[in-house]
Amino acid sequence: MSTRQKILVFMFFLLVFSFSFFAVAYAAFENVMTTTVRAQGMGDAFCSISDEPASILINPAGITKLKRMSLGSSYSNLFFGLVNDLVYNSLISFSTPIQIENEKTKNAIGALWSLLGSNKYSENIFAFSYAHQIFESLSVGGTLKILFWNSARTLSFNSEEEGPLSNTSISLDAGLIYKPDEAISFGLTLGNLNQPNIVSSSSKIEDHLPLEIRTGGSFSLEKLLISFDFINKYYTYQERTESTVCVGAEQDLAPLFKVPLSVRGGVNFPFLNGTNLSFGGSYKNLENDFPFQIDYAMIISLFQANLFTHRFSFTTSFAPVQEALKEEMRKREEELKRLEEEKKKLEEKKKEIKEKAGEAIKLEERTDGLGIIIDADIIFSEQTSVLSSEGFSILDRALEMANLYPENKIRVEGHTDSTGSWAANMKLSLERAQAVANYLVSKGIDKSRISSRGYGADKPVDSNDTETGRKQNRRIEIIILKW
């Protein structure tokens, strides 16, 4: 599908949605229903996106888009220009994908607590959501909300003092997101399906939350995201409706300026309450083991120019325990596989070096490391510590072997037979070990890695009673240590 066709499809569905439902005062709880700061920075046009843990109050179906467990918090100082009171909104949200046995589609759960508070009044929302991906392009979700408010003592119209007022009620939401294309998405939410009564339980009158029908669409072009929402509120018990149109856009700046920032803006048109402008941005750090996102939004009321709102949020994500264990197991398996491949290559290289050296070198696996055993009669002139011309080429093979273990320490040992005095043999064995060590250092081995020792005839490997045994005892051992 071409870009032009995508735009035409998007506009067609958007018109169908808007004319199908277009018809929408703020009662209690309505000011805190839109809770994600990113959405607020886009003028609340978020119904078809809703890919953050706090967006379950906008469209619960959106959390199926989340691939990791997410935790978010936000704080808002509402109506900054308000005199003699402080109105604030704080929120904690959580969502995580879940795997249902024998089911390949995505499922997710979410929870949220939101508090709208002031000096004498507070509203609490406890929300619990479940979302299910029916098809790859279609997800549905539902939210159960527990709504609680209370106020301080009040003075009634007949000057009688009334006790603190409060109310607890339950509300239900349902939503879906349809994504026919990677660049296009549509959303539908039915809020407050049961239209609960939110008036104090001690009151004889009733006031119900409106049935809210929210439709929306979004379209992405490269890294630019444009979204539209239509919010229609039906106050059944008051026999009136209110409508709001929301338009928003978001631009990812990372491809343009190589910085992990996004900027956004939006316009909100409540038909009976004037226009609201919003601006915002995000900073994302997704490259390490602790990914996080910081969002900011500013909402300006053109209806009451002295009132504006700042909102901040922090969101992070991490792998669920089951996913983390799987990831850890996968990493271990990859590491074991890598080590096995390295070991195989190492053995092949050792075999190749051994074949080049012929009978002059023997390899021996020892408890303290890998031993390279060299016949001293081949690499040294008789009864001296002077390397022969053939000795240089053989030590070059030993050097290749040592270079296979660039981090390991190396110990060079000199050994002789029992012919001659003990002191002479000790001196010759040490001088030969030092000569080999010096040659390896001259070829690039770090001096701090290598040491040399002379043992004379103290550590024979064969009997000194025969010429064959004495020849076996005259040797140089280069040990590549394990530690």
Image (cartoon, grey):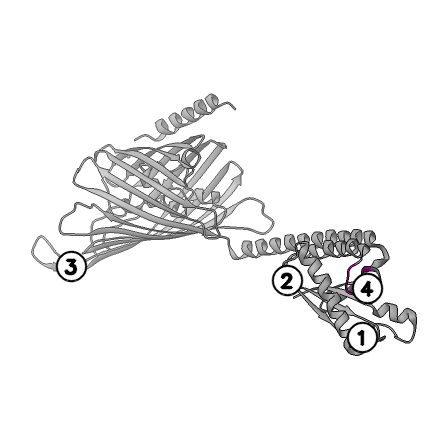
Q: Work out whether mark 3 precedes mark 1 in sequence or the reverse, and give the earlier one.
A: 3
- SS at circle 3: loop
Mark 4 nearby-residue class (10 Å; few <14, some 14–19, many ≥20):
many
Mark sitting on residue 376:
4
Distance between mark 2 and mark 1 Cα atoms: 26 Å
Residue matched to label 2 = 449
**98 vs 276, nearest the viewer:** 276
Q: What residue type is labelled 1?
A: Ala
Q: Work out whether mark 3 precedes mark 2 in sequence or the reverse, and give the earlier one.
A: 3
Residue 371, given in percent of the width and then of the height, sits at 76, 64
Instruction: Please identify, in this view, whether the residue under mark 3 or under mark 1 is nearer the observer.
Output: 1
The residue positioned farthest toward the left in the image shown: 159
Q: What residue type is labelled 2?
A: Arg
Q: Which amino acid does label 4 sit on?
A: Ala
Mark sitting on residue 153:
3
Distance between mark 4 and mark 2 Cα atoms: 23 Å
